[in-house]
Image (cartoon, rainbow, N blue to C red):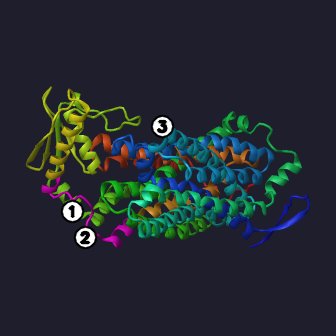
């Protein structure tokens, strides 16, 4: 790769290899993604440790919501670090994000549990997630811009796609460390040790990654485009008002958000995160098997990001990204149905042969979501639905007569529920346990498996289904950094680009697992949560096709 003149810390001109720029930027970003993804991959364990006061469904939704909460603060980090990057330089902004992210992740590994300190535990966890999201909000834009402003005009797609691979390396690293820790801790300390304390190890490992990240980024110098802008005195004095207060720039921000980032958030996080929730919670696949499948898909994605980034240098960013969006759109529902048939065919067969219907007075039914742990779910309808939600099976709803006791129809069999509203807590708990046992017995009699049968797994078929989504996500994500950088002028690039990126990935993508699972818990159909990513992707397809311009031949010195 070429040598690029950049200003060193001492003010002298020093040659910086593009290879070094790409490696340091991508590696630092990968370490930050590792920090962030460890939490998402351990949502099931986190729900038990920090939300043990909630019922299993509410606790799991709360953990997924907390995963999304980290993303909610990413736009704020994008604004703060974006302003720093546009006013003071790219390097300083994304160097600072590393320390904040690494420190917050390491701290999660030291937090007390709910059993130890009560509500203080989830409160501290929320704070750490906010700091993580805030830090990551300033990371991606800085790394992508830094590489793009160093890269030759005809190779920006390929060069910035290496920044995209950082997400794959970070996720693969997180899954690898989690899998390794599970195996070692389980082998030497027993099967319950990981959930008790072994989950802390992947978070604590971030301390070493933090040191490596800071060391690598300290070796970098400022980008040539920023130095030229600074020398010419054209740097923006008010990046916020210029980026968002002038319609010519604001409309580009909105276009980037709707035409690209809505789909990116929906497709990428459905592919790499909600699929894990779906396989574990609904298909009853063991976490270790899910980790292996996701690691294989993630390793493949690292190659595909570069392939599609390079392809966009030849045929254009828009064509490649739009193809990825359309592929995901047509694959969402048939793809997840195929996952069920390849990983838990007994479940798919039972759903087709023995459908489940909950017949209840609608007035006695509430949403199966209790983020504060106050709802008791003791009506006959709530007891029935909470049991089915915890079992991870699909059911439909049928209105019953007013005041009637709910019934669960499993094929031709009928399991009556019971109402426990007027009973003392201990008796209500016993009634719920009795109904749950009867429902579980009815599910077993109807052919619904308690867990996926390893003898009937088609892991190669499941991997093939996941790869369809991986190809879609990579076709969209690979060229995306170059496209976003090319859409905005240098003087406001960091600020203007970072905000739509992190709204899309944070507010759309980050809440995919939480929202999709909450929809399933409320509706009863395990596939209903897919309407959330489907809707955002469809909106992006239409907007991208009609409004997004091609950017690959645009100069960056705007």
List x then y, in percent, for residue 114.
46, 43
Foreground residue among 293 and 245: 293
**C-alpha span from label 2 to label 3:** 43 Å
Q: Earlier in the sequence, mark 1 or mark 2?
A: 1
State yes or no: residue 474 in magenta: no
Q: Which residue is mark 1?
A: 346
Foreground residue among 552 and 129: 129
Q: Earlier in the sequence, mark 2 or mark 3?
A: 3
Mark 1 residue element: helix
Asked if residue 549 can be seen in this view, the reply is: no
Q: Which residue is mark 2?
A: 456
Mark 2 residue element: helix
Q: Which residue is mark 3?
A: 119
State yes or no: residue 461 in magenta: yes
Mark 3 residue element: loop
Q: Are marks 2 and 3 in contact (CB under 8 Å)?
A: no
Q: Residue at x 25, y 72 (%)?
A: 455
List x then y, in percent, for residue 543.
51, 46
Q: Nearer the viewer, mark 2 or mark 3?
A: 3
């Amino acid at each position: 790769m070429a040598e690029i003149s950049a200003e060193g810390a001492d003010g002298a001109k020093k040659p910086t290899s593009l290879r070094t720029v790409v490696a340091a930027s991508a590696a630092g970003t990968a370490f930050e993604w590792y920090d962030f993804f460890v939490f998402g991959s351990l949502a099931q364990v986190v729900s038990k440790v920090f939300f043990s006061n909630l019922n299993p469904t509410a606790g799991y939704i709360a953990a997924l919501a907390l995963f999304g909460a980290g993303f909610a603060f990413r736009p704020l980090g994008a604004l703060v670090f974006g302003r720093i990057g546009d006013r003071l330089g790219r390097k300083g902004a994304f160097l600072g994000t590393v320390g904040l992210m690494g420190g917050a992740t390491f701290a999660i590994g030291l937090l007390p549990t709910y059993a130890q300190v009560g509500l203080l535990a989830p409160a501290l966890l929320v704070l750490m997630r906010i700091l993580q999201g805030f830090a990551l909000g300033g990371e991606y834009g800085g790394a992508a811009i830094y590489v793009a402003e160093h890269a030759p005009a005809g190779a920006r797609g390929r060069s910035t796609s290496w920044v995209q691979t950082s997400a794959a390396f970070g996720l693969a690293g997180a899954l690898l460390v989690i899998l390794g820790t599970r195996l070692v801790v389980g082998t030497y300390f027993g099967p319950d040790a990981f959930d008790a304390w072994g989950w802390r190890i992947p978070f604590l490992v971030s301390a070493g990654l933090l040191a490596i990240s800071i060391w690598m980024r300290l070796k970098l110098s400022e980008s040539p485009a920023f130095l030229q802008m600074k020398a010419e005195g054209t740097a923006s004095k008010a990046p916020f008002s210029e980026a968002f207060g002038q319609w010519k720039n604001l409309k580009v921000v909105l276009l980037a958000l709707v035409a690209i980032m809505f789909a990116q958030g929906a497709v990428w996080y459905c592919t790499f995160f909600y699929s894990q929730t779906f396989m574990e919670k609904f298909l009853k696949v063991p976490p270790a098997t899910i980790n292996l499948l996701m690691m294989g898909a993630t390793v493949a994605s690292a190659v595909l990001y570069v392939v599609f980034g390079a392809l966009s240098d030849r045929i254009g960013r828009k064509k490649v990204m739009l193809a990825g969006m359309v592929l995901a759109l047509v694959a969402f529902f048939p793809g997840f149905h195929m996952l069920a048939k390849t990983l838990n065919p007994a479940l798919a067969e039972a759903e087709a042969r023995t459908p489940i219907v909950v017949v209840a007075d609608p007035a006695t039914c509430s949403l199966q979501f209790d983020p504060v742990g106050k709802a008791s779910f003791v009506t006959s309808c709530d007891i029935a639905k909470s049991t089915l939600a915890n079992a991870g099976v699909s059911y439909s709803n049928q209105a019953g007569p007013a005041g009637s006791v709910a019934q669960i129809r499993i094929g031709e069999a009928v399991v009556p529920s019971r109402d426990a509203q007027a009973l003392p807590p201990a008796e209500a708990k016993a009634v719920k346990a009795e109904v749950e046992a009867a429902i579980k017995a009815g599910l077993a009699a109807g052919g619904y498996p308690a867990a996926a049968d390893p003898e009937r797994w088609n892991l190669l078929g499941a991997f093939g289904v996941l790869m369809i989504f991986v190809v879609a996500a990579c076709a969209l994500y690979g060229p995306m950094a170059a496209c976003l950088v090319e859409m905005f002028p240098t003087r406001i690039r960091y600020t203007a680009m970072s905000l739509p990126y992190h709204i899309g990935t944070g507010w759309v993508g980050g809440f995919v697992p939480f929202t999709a699972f909450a929809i399933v818990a409320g509706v009863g159909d395990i596939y209903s949560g897919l309407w959330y990513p489907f809707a955002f992707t469809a909106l992006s397809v239409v907007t991208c096709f009609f409004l997004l311009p091609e950017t690959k031949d645009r100069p960056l010195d705007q």
